[in-house]
Amino acid sequence: MTLDLLPIGQRAVVTAVDWAALAPDEAQRLQSLGLDVGARVALSHRGVFGGRDPLAVMIGRMTVALRRSHARAMTVGHI
């Protein structure tokens, strides 16, 4: 399952990231925020308009807003 499809409140671990699907500067920014293979995440909120962007993702104690397209590049599995 990809991160954008994770049910709200469910915890997961990032198992794979399709870095080629992201622009190089965006990929580097996500890695610097800790979004890489092995990161423990939880989806805490989805936007309410249009494409339901942005997504609020918890990474540890930090909340990060992600575009849906970025979250779609990350495969997650159950903890």
Image: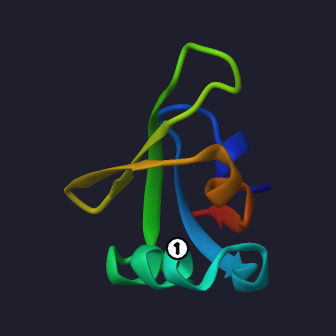
Quarter of the picture containing the N terminus is: bottom right
Q: Is residue 32 left or right of residue 21?
A: left
Q: Is residue 53 left or right of residue 69?
A: left
What residue lies at 51% left-to-right and 36% top-to-bottom?
54
Instruction: State the image coordinates of residue 57 (x, y, percent, origin top left).
Output: 42, 48
Indicate the position of residue 77 as horizontal and vertical percent values: 68, 64
Query: For the point 59% across and 72% down, which residue is it?
Result: 14
Q: Secondary structure at mark 1?
A: helix
User: What amino acid is at disc 1?
Assistant: Glu
Residue 78 at what x, y percent from top left?
63, 60
Spot the residue most to the left: 61
Relative depth, front residue between 10 and 14 = 14
Write down the quadrant of residue 51 in the picture: top right
Above or below, 22 relative to 49 = below
Q: Which residue is mark 1?
A: 26
Q: Residue at x 52, y 41 (%)?
A: 10
Q: Which of 39/53 is in front?
A: 53
